[in-house]
Amino acid sequence: MAAFVSGPRRRAAIAAAATRHARGVRVRVVDRAWTVARPTGKVTVCRTFDQLLDELTGRCVDRRVLRSVLLDAAGSVPTPS
């Protein structure tokens, strides 16, 4: 799994897709992790893809659907030659 979501460009694609699909949060990339910011000001650091899914699940998005959307976003990033 790590190979599919590692690297700054893939993490950025995942963050953008997560922000679009999970209501009321802002997902950003930080060094080897994501942050999930809520409107209340609470910020959670997610170091793994599963932690990110755990944090976003229940925000009007099914976990399986969200996982698929985020992996598709990561897969859309071209690999360097």
Image: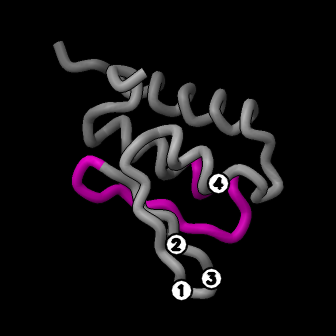
Q: Are marks 2 and 1 in contact (CB under 8 Å)?
A: yes
Q: Are marks 2 and 3 in contact (CB under 8 Å)?
A: no
- Boundaries of the magenta span: 17-32
Please give the name of the residue rendered at 41% of the width and 42% of the height, measured from the top-left corner: 48
> Which quadrant would the C terminus be assigned to in this image?
top left
User: Which structural element holds mark 2?
Assistant: strand
Please name the colour scheme applied to the rendered image.
Answer: one colour
- Give 78 or 29, whichever is nearer the viewer: 29
> Which quadrant would the N terminus be assigned to in this image?
top left
Please give the name of the residue rendered at 49% of the width and 61% of the height, measured from the top-left corner: 27
Q: Amino acid at mark 1?
A: Gly
- Which residue was labeled with disc 1? 41
- Which residue was labeled with disc 2? 37
Q: Is residue 20 magenta?
A: yes
> Horizontal placement of 61 versus 80: left or right?
right
Image: 20 above or below 25 = above
Q: Are marks 3 and 1 in contact (CB under 8 Å)?
A: yes
Instruction: Give the total of numbered labels.
Output: 4
Q: Are marks 4 and 3 in contact (CB under 8 Å)?
A: no
Q: Amino acid at mark 4?
A: Leu
Q: Which disc is residue 56 wearing?
A: 4
- Which residue was labeled with disc 3? 39
Single out the residue that lies furthest toward the left. Answer: 81
The answer for how far apart the CA atoms under marks 2 and 1 are is: 6 Å
What percent of the width, then of the height, locates residue 3?
Answer: 33, 21
**On the image, which quarter does residue 77 sit in?**
top left
